[in-house]
């Protein structure tokens, strides 16, 4: 459902220049990936009492924002990576200006998708949709992905190691914020109570940090072929990671601790209904790429 909807989300245009932009957007959006954020959004909507289909616009928007962040992250003046999801990064498959603009256009498309009232059933009120758009804006801007990326860039290559609290700040914003938005927007659309949304926000923050800790471990222990992106990049660029700061064994212990914290946040829900979110937390913890 998600992949098909994403495939249809970028229309073909009659002008060659528009075709190039849409081709670059489509290339990046449909390059594969785990689709964790849409899955979290749909599962949270169902857990909160809605139908999964209600949350599809928000689920698509979270994947579009994530794709934008990957396109921009890979650019030479950011994280400078040539590979993404097992093939050339957007700026290598096209060029840097096209990639930059494709990312910008992807962000705009995300908000167009999430705010389209006609995409939601009558069960979802305009007030809920407005809250969803607000969550997506917060997670992608100066309180989320953008500030996390900036602090990460400014913290790379320093003579002193980044302290643990600053590393946590980076990843709560750069990585966890969008996972949080995926879960919370799903819960809002599903009609979750404020208390339920708070529980799910806590769950999402835990799996967001967990996602990054596991990423850091995999970057150190897996090959580029296994990961589908350049392995060992963090070490080569002297970036502070959890294994660098606390060691590989303690990073694995921290991952288990975060997994436990995430599951605890679901204790207020029926265990059978919460099972999909438990499964997704386990998937994030034990993935191999």
Image (cartoon, helix red, strand yellow):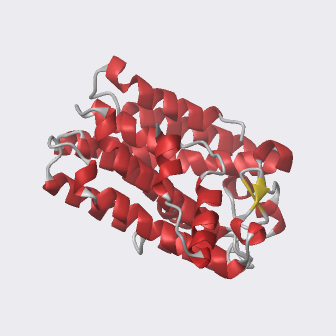
Q: Is residue 187 left or right of residue 81?
A: left
The answer to whether residue 220 shows anywhere in this view is: yes
**Which quadrant of the view contains residue 47?**
top left
- Picture residue at 81% right of the left edge, 44% below the top: 221
Q: Is residue 170 left or right of residue 89?
A: left
Nearer-the-camera pick, 142 or 56: 56
Total numbered labels placed on residues in the image: 0
Quadrant of the image containing the C terminus: top right
212 to 164, vertically: above or below: above
Q: Is residue 108 left or right of residue 82?
A: left
Where does the image place residue 232, in percent across and percent down from the top left?
82, 57
202 to 11, vertically: above or below: above
Residue occupying the far top of the picture: 272
Nearer-the-camera pick, 72 or 173: 72
- Picture residue at 32% right of the left edge, 27% below the top: 267
Q: Is residue 147 left or right of residue 55?
A: right
The answer to whether residue 184 shows anywhere in this view is: no
Where does the image place residue 260, in percent across and percent down from the top left?
48, 33
Where does the image place residue 145, in percent across and percent down from the top left?
49, 66
**Which quadrant of the view contains residue 98?**
bottom right
- Picture residue at 43% right of the left edge, 65% below the top: 109
- Picture residue at 50% right of the left edge, 59% below the top: 10
């Amino acid at each position: 459902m998600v992949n098909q909807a994403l495939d249809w989300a970028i229309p073909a245009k009659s002008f060659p220049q528009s075709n190039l932009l849409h081709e670059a957007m489509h290339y990046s959006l449909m390059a594969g990936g785990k689709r964790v954020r849409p899955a979290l959004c749909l599962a949270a909507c169902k857990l909160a009492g809605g139908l999964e289909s209600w949350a599809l616009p928000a689920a698509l928007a979270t994947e579009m924002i994530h794709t934008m962040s990957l396109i921009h992250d890979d650019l030479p003046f950011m994280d400078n990576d040539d590979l993404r999801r097992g093939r050339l990064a957007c700026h290598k498959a096209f060029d840097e200006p096209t990639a930059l603009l494709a990312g910008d256009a992807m962000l705009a498309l995300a908000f167009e998708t999430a705010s389209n009232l006609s995409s939601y059933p009558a069960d979802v009120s305009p007030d809920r949709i407005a809250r969803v758009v607000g969550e997506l804006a917060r997670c992608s801007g100066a309180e989320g992905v953008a500030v996390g990326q900036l602090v990460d860039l400014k913290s790379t290559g320093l003579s002193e190691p980044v302290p643990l609290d600053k590393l946590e700040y980076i990843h709560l914003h750069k990585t966890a914020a969008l996972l949080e938005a995926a879960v919370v927007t799903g819960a809002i659309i599903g009609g979750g109570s404020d208390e339920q949304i708070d529980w799910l926000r806590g769950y999402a923050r835990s799996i967001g940090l967990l996602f990054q800790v596991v990423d850091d471990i995999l970057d150190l222990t897996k090959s580029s072929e296994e990961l589908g992106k350049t392995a060992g990049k963090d070490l080569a660029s002297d970036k502070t990671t959890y294994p660098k700061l606390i060691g590989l064994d303690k990073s694995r212990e921290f991952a288990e601790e975060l997994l436990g914290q995430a599951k605890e946040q679901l204790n207020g829900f029926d265990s059978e209904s919460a099972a999909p979110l438990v499964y997704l937390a386990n998937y994030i913890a034990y993935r191999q790429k």
